[in-house]
């Protein structure tokens, strides 16, 4: 009825709160919680200027999960390659983020529009075997795994080139990744050396590739 007053709403504390006021309070609480969660999810970029190891360090663009990457010199997939890279003074990891490594291959202008489908020259036949080993400062091996390049699982960061990682299998392959343990506020020794060993197969294409070591940046 016109002119009828809205009945008050009884709050959980026994106080009478008008219906409109209760709705505004609920809305404000929802907005505040959403904004707080958004702020907590966003992380500031890690400082990378202190890196003293091999390769070129740069940031991975991602407003929610910013990361960093170290790219090493390119080599041809058609020829055997071995490398040993030092990783002195790596940027720190985020909690629950680990270090990862893999193979980066640039797409040609004709291949780029086909993404996420990779060229068949990289996904079929016997391209080559890539082995990666990661050691800490004490010489302890943090991961040691090899795989056929044609079986790699391909993804990419924002505005970046495709990145191939081990297609993990509990019975066949182990991932090229390492997550430090944190117990009693102590961290494991950081990675120090990444060793690379590549052997081309009969179907290896003569195209450049390079090894990447990184943390964070995932969607």
Image (cartoon, grey):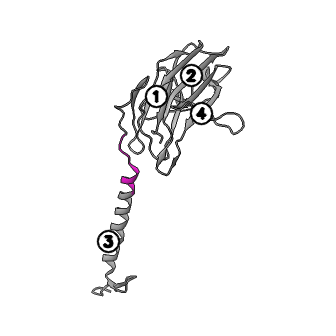
Q: Is residue 91 left or right of residue 144?
A: left
The image quarter containing residue 196 is top right
Cα distance in 3D space between marks 3 and 1: 54 Å
As helix, strand or loop, the secondary structure at mark 2 comes to: strand
* Residue beneath disc 4: 143
Q: Residue at x 50, y 33 (%)?
A: 191
Q: Residue at x 34, y 62 (%)?
A: 32
Task: Give yes or no for contact between labels 4 and 2 (Cβ–Cβ under 8 Å).
Answer: no
Magenta-highlighted residues: 37-45
* Residue beneath disc 2: 196
Q: Is residue 98 magenta?
A: no
Around disc 4, counting alpha carbons within 10 Å, would you say few (fewer than 14), some (14 to 19), or many (20 or more)?
Answer: some
Depth check: 96 or 85 in front?
Answer: 85
Q: Is residue 77 visible?
A: no
- Where does residue 110 sit, x and y in percent of width and height? 49, 20
**Mark 3 or mark 4, which has the lower sequence index?**
3
* Residue beneath disc 3: 24
Q: Is residue 109 left or right of residue 26?
A: right
Cα distance in 3D space between marks 2 and 3: 60 Å
**Mark 1 or mark 2, which has the lower sequence index?**
1
Depth check: 74 or 48 in front?
Answer: 48
**Mark 4 or mark 2, which has the lower sequence index?**
4
Around disc 2, counting alpha carbons within 10 Å, would you say few (fewer than 14), some (14 to 19), or many (20 or more)?
Answer: some
The image quarter containing residue 13 is bottom left
Cα distance in 3D space between marks 1 and 2: 13 Å
Q: Residue at x 53, y 41 (%)?
A: 179
| Image height of 37 relative to 10, above or below | above
Specify the label residue 87 is tagged with: 1
Which of labels 3 and 1 is toward the front? Answer: 1
Which of labels 3 and 4 is toward the front? Answer: 4
């Amino acid at each position: 009825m016109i002119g009828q007053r809205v009945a008050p709403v009884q709050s959980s504390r026994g106080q009478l709160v008008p219906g409109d006021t209760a709705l505004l309070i609920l809305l404000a609480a929802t907005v505040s919680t959403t904004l707080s969660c958004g702020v907590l999810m966003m992380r500031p970029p890690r400082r990378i200027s202190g890196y003293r190891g091999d390769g070129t360090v740069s940031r991975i663009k991602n407003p929610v999960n910013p990361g960093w990457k170290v790219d090493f010199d390119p080599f041809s997939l058609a020829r055997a390659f071995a490398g040993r890279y030092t990783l002195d003074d790596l940027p720190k990891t985020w909690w629950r983020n680990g270090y990862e490594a893999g193979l980066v291959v640039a797409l040609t202008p004709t291949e780029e529009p086909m993404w996420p489908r990779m060229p068949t020259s990289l996904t079929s036949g016997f391209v080559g075997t890539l082995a990666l080993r990661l050691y800490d400062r004490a010489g302890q091996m943090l991961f040691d795994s090899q795989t056929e390049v044609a079986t790699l699982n391909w993804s990419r960061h924002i505005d970046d080139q495709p990145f191939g990682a081990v297609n993990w299998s509990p019975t066949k392959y182990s991932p090229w990744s390492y997550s430090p343990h944190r117990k009693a506020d102590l961290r494991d020794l950081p990675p120090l050396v990444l060793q690379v060993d590549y052997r081309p197969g009969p179907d290896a294409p003569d195209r450049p590739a390079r090894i990447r070591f990184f943390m964070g940046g995932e969607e």
